[in-house]
């Protein structure tokens, strides 16, 4: 999903949280929002692995070209294409953040942002490809090792 959608949905999410859970501080809402967007930094890491550059602008261009190509394919064809290994896209991080969040609220805010991001990604991936490859880091790694 494109960053502009994560930004839009993230703003809507924290606005809803603000009204339904006024006890969450502005700091907490900012952490939730930022983590719901910047979890995608792992896309730049994957681009570095594939291309050897940490330039986020080149990474964005590369992903946009890939997305244009994928958008032209039928759903059944998209299912067969491995789009990459994304380090922070997995329920395993959410479990860790949730556990740490029981002791430190900062991690709970990260958990909320990551969870929201993954939820939106899951909906998009199910709609677009009919798969849920990015749900688990372990599953994604196994796919990465077999489909590089």
Image (spheres, rainbow, N blue to C red):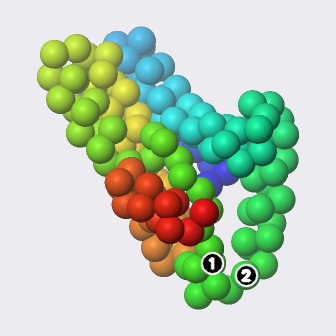
State the quadrant of the C terminus: bottom right
Helix, strand or loop under label 1: helix
Task: Assess whether mark 2 and mark 1 are in contact (beta carbons under 8 angstroms).
Answer: yes
Q: Is residue 7 left or right of residue 22?
A: right
Task: Report which quarter residue 122 is drawn in.
Answer: bottom left
Residue sitting at 45 percent across and 47 percent down? Answer: 89
Residue sitting at 42 percent across and 13 percent down? Answer: 26
Distance from label 1 to label 2 (Cα)?
6 Å
Residue sitting at 39 percent across and 51 percent down? Answer: 137
Query: Which residue matches tag 2?
Result: 73
Q: Pinpoint residue 25: horizontal percent, then vertical percent.
A: 34, 13
Residue sitting at 25 percent across and 16 percent down? Answer: 105
Is 42 drawn above or below residue 126 in the view shown? above
Helix, strand or loop under label 2: loop
Query: Which residue matches tag 1?
Result: 78
Is 130 drawn above or below residue 140 in the view shown? below
Image mark for residue 87: none
Q: Is residue 88 left or right of residue 79?
A: left
């Amino acid at each position: 999903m494109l960053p502009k959608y994560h930004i839009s949905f993230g703003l809507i999410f924290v606005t809803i949280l603000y009204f339904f859970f006024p006890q969450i501080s502005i700091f907490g809402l900012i952490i939730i929002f930022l983590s719901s967007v910047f979890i995608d930094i792992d896309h730049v890491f994957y681009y570095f692995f594939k291309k050897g550059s940490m330039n986020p602008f080149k990474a964005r261009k590369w992903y946009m070209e890939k997305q244009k190509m994928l958008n032209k394919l039928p759903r059944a064809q998209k299912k067969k294409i491995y789009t990459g290994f994304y380090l922070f896209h997995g329920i395993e991080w959410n479990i860790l953040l949730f556990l740490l969040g029981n002791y430190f609220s900062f991690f709970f805010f990260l958990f909320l942002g990551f969870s929201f991001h993954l939820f939106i990604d899951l909906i998009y991936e199910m709609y677009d490809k009919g798969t849920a490859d990015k749900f688990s880091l372990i599953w994604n790694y196994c796919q990465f090792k077999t489909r590089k």
